[in-house]
Amino acid sequence: MMRNELFAAVDRYFDGERAASIAAELTQFYRTPGSSGSLEAIAVLQSAFRDAGFDDLEVNDYPVDDSWEPRSASLSMVGESGDSTLVDYESAPPCLAPWSRATSADGEVLEVIDVGTGESTDHFEGAGVAGKAVFIHGTTRRPAWWEAARLAVQYGARGIITDYMLYQIPGIREPHLVPDAVQLLRLPMKDADAWAFSISHRAAENLKSRLRRGKVEVRAKVDIVRREGVLRNLVATIEGSELPEESILYCAHSSGVKPGANCAEGPGMLVELARALRDAIEAGDLSRPKRTLRFLIGAEGAGIARYIQDNPEEVSGTSVAFTFCSPGHRQDLTRANLMLYNSPDSVPGYINDYLAELIDLSPKEADWIEKDGGAELDQIRVAQHFYTPWSDNGRFAAEGIQAPLFMSWPDRYFHSQLLTPEVIDPVVLRRCSLVVGVAGLELASAGEAEAIRIAMVVAGNARRRLSALASGIEIPGMDSGDMLRRAIARTLDLSRAALRRTLELVPSERREHAERAIAEFELQLAADADRELASLAESPQEDNPSDDAFLVPVKVGTGRAPRWAGLNYSDLLEAADAFRSEDPSAGFNCLRVVADELWANVDGSTTVGDISLNVGLEFRLRLAINGIMILLRGLEEAGYVNLRSGPVEGTNTKEE
């Protein structure tokens, strides 16, 4: 079928209102992994899948040793004329941090000690917080919450109160702009003998005012249940007609807090997309794809990790895994774009370029004034940007699977009680489903002609990137001849790898024509790169890298290192300062993606200097090598890498 026919067929069968209705039903449950609420939500999704005709729905249960869920909670300031409520679970379910301890039924009264941002032992030493509650002021640095909460528990605080708002964006998402939002936060340890409440900016200003006037006491009531629980994964399948062992995967997570409409949008859309494609195939309006389409729903993190662990053959046969975190926000309420976060450079592939074309050509919402029909004008903001490991896309990428992520961002209400069903937009869900539905159908039925066409798109975009690099507009400030030459070489290597990956769409015995076409594209790109390199030959400025740039990190063992392994909070501050000194747009917020892609670039032969360049190119940052070394020294201290002098053959055995 022609692409416009595929779009039309998906559009006829996909019902955005039904997808939004399924998502809205999930918002009534508190859905921490393994909790009773998560099982109730999964039951809704099971029923919806069965109603959609998936009688062979696969259901897999996994035990959870220690699930946590709240039943009720409240926090009030104690006053002579009665208590005044700061926050309560009924009106703001995200207020109680997971892993908080319970109190007696009558609650407990604790004095509150203001410890500022709580990021240093200096904030706690001599403050007398043992047996009391601490008030921790929010900052824009996300890991600062974990450090402050850890120190509060270490110094014996029995309660924690904070007004943290994560992922602030000036002018869009700041506490004073959303003064009633209560942020979901998690305690960094499961065994803390403390409770933790998030409160709104408005409530925090009230508390601060009282603290300035003198002693403040709060009454906390916390009723939680901890027990053995169950993770439940659902897998619905549209089996391929010719190559069923190869697959395209759609993944959404059932977990989330209440109301958690952001998390609910993914599974709501996924069930409806599965129904739409199945019905269209059964009706004969779509051909059954050659490869399998698989729809996976489970708890974010643990549930999807179990799927990957228990289904190695399915995982190895998956070429693309689409992940959906919050793909249907009302943009007027939340200030969001429908975001496509790219699959990372550490998994070279064609999917980012392919999806960019598909988004551009997908039906829009409004007609051009000079036509009757056509739907050519956007009423939805759609943006494509760098890889960001918001959800399970990072887990699929770690398996070498191309892993794009669709979500809504910026989100003024992110992980707060304001994410009610009112933020769910059927129109945005429709647009997202049109793109990924057609993508799945095309890729699942692709052969030689389609592989060549996708390779042509990849090659065209690669040529534009090479030109942008050589002109100095790709990464402002990267004007060193040596760095630009290395950047062009890296871009050429990634583009070649992406071109070659299109051959996965062609059975091995039918690749001859595609291989010749891709070889021709590679030659053209190499000629373009040579031409751009020649323009740099007279550049007088050269880099003078430090000795550290020539070190080669080698992984120890086969496991994946935890992010920021071997580092404490002060190390992260030092790394952030190092990155910011080289590039003002870098700093604390880039640490997560830089650390993840740094680890993915450790292959036993790539030098620290090239890792710094590779990761910087991916995110258009100039990354200071001393910042990269702080992250690598942490990995070395934790036993995950060895640092050696000069390029060596890759090995995963630890030196004796």
Image: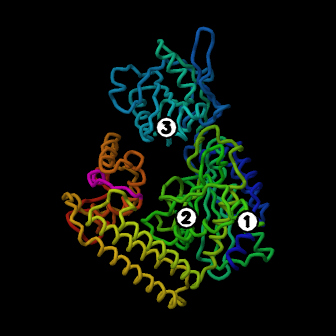
Residue sitting nearer the eye, 175 or 421: 175
Q: Are marks 3 and 1 in contact (CB under 8 Å)?
A: no
Q: What kind of element bears circle 3?
A: loop
Position of the N terminus by quadrant = bottom right
- Count numbered badges in the picture: 3
Mark 3 vs mark 2: which is more N-terminal? 3
Position of the C terminus by quadrant = bottom left
Q: Is residue 626 magenta?
A: yes
Q: Where does the image place residue 171, in percent across and percent down from the top left?
A: 53, 39
Q: Where does the image place residue 206, in percent across and percent down from the top left?
A: 55, 20
Q: Amino acid at mark 1?
A: Glu
Which residue is tagged 1?
370
Q: What kind of element bears circle 2?
A: helix
Query: Looking at the image, which residue sits at the far top?
Result: 80
Magenta span: 619-629
Q: Where does the image place residue 194, in percent across and percent down from the top left?
A: 49, 29
Mark 3 vs mark 1: which is more N-terminal? 3
Q: What kind of element bears circle 1?
A: loop
Residue 194's tag is none
Which residue is tagged 3?
187
